[in-house]
Amino acid sequence: MAATSNEAATRQDSSDPHEIPPFRRRYEAALANPRLAANVTRYQRNWRGNRDLSIDEIEFEGMRKSFKATKERVQERLDDYLAQFQRAAEAAGTIVHHAGNARDANRIALEICRRHDARQIVKSKSMVSEEIDFNHFLEGEGIECVETDLGEWIVQKAGQRPSHIVGPALHMGRQDVADLLNNRLQVPVSEENITEQVHTIRDLIRPLFFTAGVGMTGANALIAESGTVMMCTNEGNGRMASSVPPVHIVLAGIEKVIPTFDDAVTQLRLLGRSGTGQRITVYSTFITGPTPGHEMHIILVDNGRRKMRSMPEFREALHCIRCGACANVCPPYREVGGHVFGHIYTGAIGLVVTQFHHGLDAAAKPQSLCLSCNACETVCPVEIPLPRQIIDVRKIVVAKKGLPAPKRMAIAILQRPKAFRYATRVGSKAQLPFTRGSRFVRLRRVPRIRRQTRWRSLPALASKPALARIEPGIFLPQQSPVVQTPVAGKTAAIFPGCLTDRLYPEQGQAVIDVLRGLGLRVMAPRGLNCCGLPASNMGDDNAAKRMARQTIQALERAQCDFIVSGSASCVAMIIQDYLHLFRNDPGWRRRAANLATKVRDLTTFLVHDARLQPGSLASSEESDPVTYHDSCQGLNALGLGPEPRYLLNDVLGIPIQELDENRVCCGFGGSFGFDYPEVSERLMNSKLDNATATGARTLATDNQGCILHLRGGCDAGKRPLTVSHIAELIAEHLRERQSHPTG
Amino acid sequence: METDLEQSLVLIAQFSERATPLGTVVEHVGASDAAALAIADVVATSGADFVCVSRPLADRAAGLVQSLVDAGTRVTVVKNAGEARDQPVGLSLAQCAIAESGSVLLDERHLSDRSSSLMTLHSIVIVPSDEILPSLDSVPGLLRQIAGTGSSGYATFVTGPSRTADIEMSLTVGVQGPGQVTVLFVDDLT
């Protein structure tokens, strides 16, 4: 039922004069706006600093797990909690309404306004009202809606929509606000003085609280035990809108219900910090029933939420407390803003929930802007598995709409080992006129692909893949260990990953050298192929499963103590994503889970299994400093941060010059650089600028995707920075030890 | 008793440490006459000669009101919400203060009671010194009390002046709530 009404709402929207422009147009407009990325970047950087400081004061991990558990409990017994809320709210004098879809919600509000002969509504911030296109509907019925949150007012007057859940106008700057006031609204204001701008807008809004017939607000939570609405604001407009007009309407999604005041306090602690880095918002208001002499209504909106609840893949998106943190760490969001990275709801959560509120078509393009860096999940105060959910949205989109031919072809080749081998063999010959003896294919001036190749040289295929250099299934001769570790004598199978195997065999060799240098018995399993990550990221579920099964079988056959990979991405895929991929297939899921216990990325293996000691592989000479680039899969998916630093700094004795914003993705994202080359290029350049600024001449990392991307950028931009895999640095130190043993 | 007082002092210091950076002015006085002087100062600085006082405060602290009058400050006990609209100074009574967050809890069911803290430009909030609590952990019980009275309730934790950073993350105080907030702890509120 919800889906049907959604479609109806979408149809209704499509005839809107303020219809959202097509995605491509939005994307191009965002790129062409020089101030947008600067404004969003400033916002993200400030937020990160403030948020991290405020998070340090609480036990964030424990608190978010506990609140997530609360939200899970609510979803299990949603109707019970909603009924409890309604009983208590009604006992306090609130009138509670239920709306199945956007149209119902709007009609209920309209009817209330008509009954009170209200011609004007003052609104505090409500994302649900954006979701149901409330203003547009009510204004069509002759009722003026005025946004009273400063940012909301700015975007409303500018004829836009909020670009961020918490900071609706963060994409705009003082010049934009001055332009709006001076030129469009004919209200004279300073072009430079933000305080004056704020106070001018404040004074324009102020009288309306006293003339409006209805005040509308959203709700941050609905507290079941007492029928209380919790509302958090900073400006005080929410308190005005809920106090002064004689009628107060609350618009709230049904997922906002929480059991008790204790839960409300946990939410307060998480929300302020995650939203704006505040311990608590300036006004945290608890409204139980109407102000005496006034009337209070609560409209509980479904509009696709029950459908979301019925789908296990997406149910956790209903835990969202609308803090906006996921947008604040999102690299593509930084470059294009929320009008592109999202639909009505923006940021990572927007990519997930849009299909339920506004249909799959609205979600189809924005979801493709996610480059799967996983940063959003690390800051989400309720641990929503957003990156995985976005991939699941992508899979639905791909199942319905298919993949473009180049991606289809790439996946077809990847999942057939023979075809893949043949293609790389042919490619390694065909590329020769372009490589001219270098490690790069430089296609900077080729007209039709310039957009993709101008800024990044492509990597040349290796003349001989890593796996073709060793006999599969047979242990390489064991070496005597250079240093004593608990792993000497154990067996290890290597999983190089496609990029290492076909592009950077020397990095695969480095991993083998390190393992052998520690006295392990090392082999390459038979039948290794791609782990399936590219197919999964492109949204081809079937191909991903097929490659996952191939990989599981090959790695099981190896029967080694450990499976070690120099690719953080492949490891994250195998030990984390396979479990979700096979969620409905218990047999394969069990096999994947068993396998996961043996699979390690190299840094984890060296620090936690081999337990390399400080100084144990230090060079006899002083080492030049390096800078370390955290790959997203290493940092955000595997939680590696201290490990590579310990290896470089403590074990190898190489000083690290940390690069600014080391948690922000370099912009690789698999095929992302081909789909959105402008965004990928900007992210890459800011990473390389930050790396260069450290003064280090070498950048080390643990992921071949980043290496491909950053080396390509260095080559195209003629930057004198060496990009190395951490295994190469370790292998180099180990070789030095082997040639000059120190006893 | 002494232990209670000492603990209040520690908590008020913590409160001040958290609230001051947000722009709240925190003062601590012994008795109502000292409080009246502090309030009269704020009123004079704002260029006014009167203060809007919420009815619950007037009921709870008749001595303070009298001291204000004695100090030459006119007192308007707000009966209609509109009386406080955009007036320079409002005076309200907090249920309690929370040291952890630098917040004061206002329990103001009636709009007329709410308007002194809601609509004025400078909100002065009086907190009896023994009504300061260490953390938000005590909040659920308080809110339960407020909501559980069988009638409606409107409670707000106020943490600093009204503010926005909607334009370029530039912090600006004084939007639709009071742009200045003074929290006045009074040991012996009469």
Image (cartoon, coloured by chain):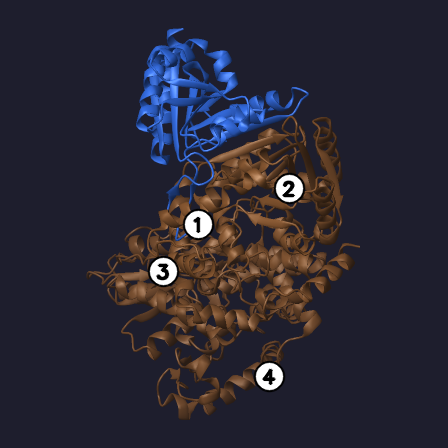
Q: Nearer the viewer, mark 1 or mark 2?
A: 1
Q: Residue under circle 2? A: A256
The chain in blue: B
Is residue A700 toward the left or the right of residue A9 in the image? left
Q: Nearer the viewer, mark 3 or mark 1?
A: 1
Residue B128 appears in which quarter of the rendering?
top left
Nearer to the camera, B102 or A174: A174
Nearer to the camera, B121 or A106: B121
Task: List x then y, in percent, for residue A586.
Answer: 71, 56
Residue A731 appears in which quarter of the rendering?
bottom left
Nearer to the camera, A165 or A364: A165
Is residue B57 toward the left or the right of residue A480 in the image? right
Name above or below for residue A723 compared with residue B189.
Answer: below
Q: Are marks 4 and 3 in contact (CB under 8 Å)?
A: no
Q: For the residue marked with disc 3, what is the amino acid?
A: Pro
Q: Are marks 4 and 2 on the same chain?
A: yes
| Secondary structure state at the residue bearing disc 1 | loop
Q: Residue at x 76, y 54 (%)?
A: A2
Name the colour assigned to chain A in the rendering.
brown
Q: Are marks 1 and 2 in contact (CB under 8 Å)?
A: no
**What's the distance in space between the residues labelled 3 and 2, CA to CA?**
58 Å
